Image: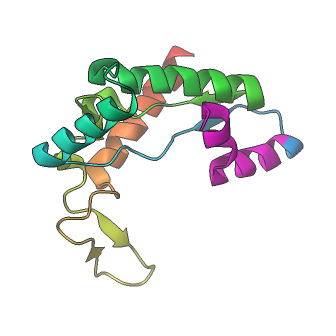
Amino acid sequence: MALSGFWEDSIAFGLIYTLRQITDKPVWFVPTPLLALNSAEQHRLSRRLKSVDRGHFESNTAYQEFVENSARFWRDQLQVILLPQPVKTVENSLNTRLEYSVDSIKRLTLGRHEKEEHDADENVHMNPQYGQAVLDAFFSALDSD
């Protein structure tokens, strides 16, 4: 699937497209983080990507190329600024560092003090430290604009 199809089929694209109908103010987009993988999972993912790309896959540049191409797409299509996943949270250009998924919380409900944590092996959702890294990157990017 082409990059444009990948993003155009996303919920984010539809939401930002609708937002663009009502405002021309700056919009920032933070994509979903990469999965958090242990070393065995990283190895399997790397092998699978290499087989798909007939051996031309370079893991140290794949994420960076994806980010650069995505940033161009969002800028050109909807005048949106893409805020990539903070570099310090990325490992091997393939996944989120494990420490950013440990102790992630399913939800906080107003009026309740209990936190419902994800299962220990859950690797999709990130923890407050990841959120802080994203906010730090966002405020740093705002300062540089």
Nearest to the observer: residue 136 or residue 64: 64
Nearest to the observer: residue 101 or residue 2: 2
Left or right: 135 in relation to 18: left
Picture quarter with the C terminus: top right
Left or right: 90 in relation to 23: left
Q: What x and y, as percent, mark residue 38?
A: 14, 48
Q: Which residues are magenta?
A: 1-20
Name which quarter of the figure residue 86 lies in.
top left
Q: How is the image coloured?
A: rainbow
Name which quarter of the figure residue 39 lies in.
top left
Q: What x and y, as percent, mark residue 16?
A: 72, 45
Q: What x and y, as percent, mark residue 141?
A: 49, 23
Residue 144 vs 63, above or below: the answer is above
Q: Residue at x 42, y 39 (%)?
A: 135
Q: Residue at x 30, y 19 (%)?
A: 58
Residue 124 vs 136, above or below: the answer is below
Nearest to the observer: residue 49 or residue 34: 49
**What main secondary structure does the magenta stretch of the protein show?**
helix
Q: What x and y, as percent, mark residue 121?
A: 19, 65
Asked whether residue 38 is in view, the answer is no
Q: Residue at x 47, y 32 (%)?
A: 138
> Does the magenta portion include 12?
yes
> Does the magenta portion include 96?
no
